[in-house]
Image (cartoon, helix red, strand yellow):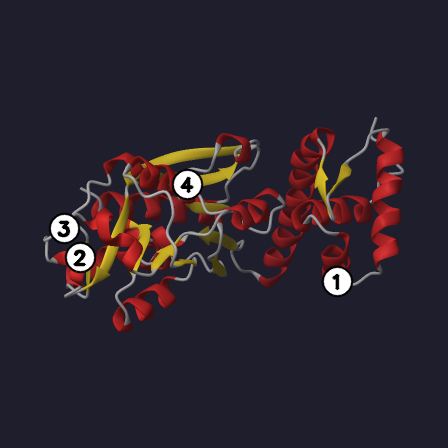
Amino acid sequence: MIDQRIKFRHLQTFVEVARQKSVVKSANLLHVSQPAVTKTVRELEEILGVSLFEREGRGIRITRYGEVFLRHAGATLAALRHAVDSVSQEAAKAGPPVRVGALPTVATRIMPQAMTAFLAENTGSPIKIVTGDNSVLLEQLRIGELDLVVGRLAAPEKMAGFSFEHLYSEPVVFVVRAGHPLLTGETAPFERMRDFPVLMPTRNSIIRPLVDYFLIANGVATLPNQIETVSDSFGRAFLKISDAVWVISEGVVAGDIAEGTICALPIDCSPTRGPVGLTVRADAMATLPQSLLMQAIRDAAAAIMP
């Protein structure tokens, strides 16, 4: 029997606090007071008989009980949102919405071709494409704000409740502007990399651990002129006016390399190769438009990748 004391506000507040890891941020997003958020979480903990959050320094972190409950609470909210969307779309005589999270590695390389093929199906479904950090996209997927995420396979601890379908693999590359001093071949790129600004993936990005290990393995323990960013537009603009080195997934800059505006340094990056594919909720049933878009993504990936 489901405890009838558990209300929608309990689930919504709990999931938002789990996402934001902050009562203050959650209160602002939910448009309620901080004491109201704290009270709601405590009510839920009393009903469940366990602690869902615990203090960590000045912030909070979710407990192992909270992690377990989050998977089911997120699925419940996702199902409810899907039900509301289905009724709304039926009333409007339109197809169900398709909401996609796309990491930069596929946003420019795969999604344009996939969307062209999908739109030709004339489903009438409204489309939403969101880009951002993988951790943010996966949380949106977990609570039903997204229907699928296209990008690199996340760490095992982040994949609880999700299903991943491999499409292809790609490495991380070190790229610079055409005519960059490191392209002369006079010295190995790693020997002089400290002399230039280096654009690095952010700490919470999927590829950052791979990049850190790869640099250490090649004798680069520190980079004094390091800039963290997930913005591909900034990366391209900064490379044009500087001697910076940009460390990024190959898919993000494949077109630029083909055009010759950006050049890959002569580095064997095969150890950084990782799987790219589709991530969906394991308990979700895909609608027809979602299935059509996923097939379009598969076809686009197969056509682009060797």
Between 245 and 251, the residue placed more toward the observer is: 245
Sooner in the amino-acid sequence: mark 2 or mark 3: 2
Callout 3 touching callout 1 (CB < 8 Å): no
Q: Position of residue 84 (x, y in %)?
A: 67, 52
Q: Which mark is residue 231?
A: none
**Marks 2 and 3, how far apart in space?**
8 Å
**What is the number of the mark on residue 187?**
3
**Foreground pick, 199 / 143:** 199
Left or right of 112: which side holds 43? right
Look at mark 1 in the image and give the residue it sits on. 28
Pointer 2 residue: 182
Horizontally, is 174 left or right of 282 in the view?
left
Q: Residue at x 84, y 31 (%)?
A: 48
Disc 2 vs disc 3: Cβ atoms closer than 8 Å? no
For badge 1, the amino acid type reads: Asn
Viewer-nearest of discs 2 and 3: 3
Q: Where residue 209 sits in the image (x, y, percent)?
A: 42, 40
Q: Position of residue 260 (x, y in %)?
A: 15, 63
N-term mark: 1 or 4: 1
Q: Which residue is label 4 attached to?
A: 278
Find the distance from the CA under tag 3 to the CA under tag 1.
Answer: 53 Å
Precedes in sequence: disc 2 or disc 1: 1
- Whether label 2 touches label 1, CB < 8 Å: no
Question: Mark 3 and mark 4: span between their CA atoms?
Answer: 40 Å
Circle 4: residue type: Leu
Nearer-N-terminus badge (2/4)? 2
Give me the residue at 66% from left, 48% from top: 19
Q: Quadrant of the N terminus?
A: top right
Q: Is 118 placed above or below 291 here?
A: below
